[in-house]
Image (cartoon, helix red, strand yellow):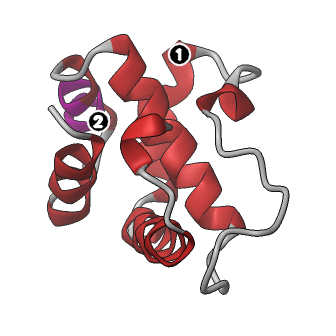
Amino acid sequence: MSIHSHIDTLKNSVPLNQSQADSFLASLSEKEQEQIIAAIYIGRDHLHDQELASGYKMDRKIIDHISKAEYGRIIVEKNTAVKQYLDALTRCAGASGFDLDKL
C-alpha cells in the first residue's frame, strides 16, 4: 500500500492512546512504520515552509536513533499536531516534486 494511504488513515483518525497507536502500527510493515514516523518528523521540520528545504535529507534514516518500541508513544504524544505535520510534509513534497513513496 502507498504511504499516501497510510498518511490519510493517520490524519483521519489520530490514535488517542498507546493501544490505538500500537494497533495502527501493527497494520503496517516495518518499512511503512519507519516511513510514517519519518514523515511526522520531516513534516514538523517543514511546518511553516512551502517546499522542502534545500539540501534536506529526505530519507527515513533520519529516525535511525529512535527505537521502534517508541513509535506508538511518539504518535500519541504528537497527538493533534500529527495532522499538521503530515499536511506540511505532503504540501512541501508536492511543491518540490518529491515522491513520498521513496521515503
Where is 11 relative to 27, above or below?
below
Where is 60 relative to 15, above or below?
above
Q: Secondary structure at mark 2?
A: helix
Q: Residue at x 14, y 31 (%)?
A: 1
Q: Along the horizontal axis of the image, is 90 left or right of 15?
A: right
Q: Along the horizontal axis of the image, is 40 left or right of 44?
A: left
Where is 57 relative to 42, above or below?
above
Say what amino acid the circle numbered 2 marks: Ala
Disc number placed over residue 21 in the picture, else none: 2
Q: Residue at x 39, y 26 (%)?
A: 33
Q: Position of residue 96 (x, y in %)?
A: 57, 71
Q: CA distance from mark 2 to mark 1?
A: 13 Å
What is the magenta segment's predominant secondary structure? helix
Q: Residue at x 71, y 64 (%)?
A: 45
Provide the residue span drawn in magenta: 19-24
Residue carrying label 1: 68
- For label 2, the crowd category at 10 Å Cα-Cα, with few meaning under 14, some 14 to 19 and many 20 or more, is some
- Which of pointers 2 and 1 lies earlier in the amino acid sequence? 2
Say what amino acid the circle numbered 1 marks: Lys
Q: Position of residue 54 (x, y in %)?
A: 82, 67
Q: Residue at x 15, y 52 (%)?
A: 9
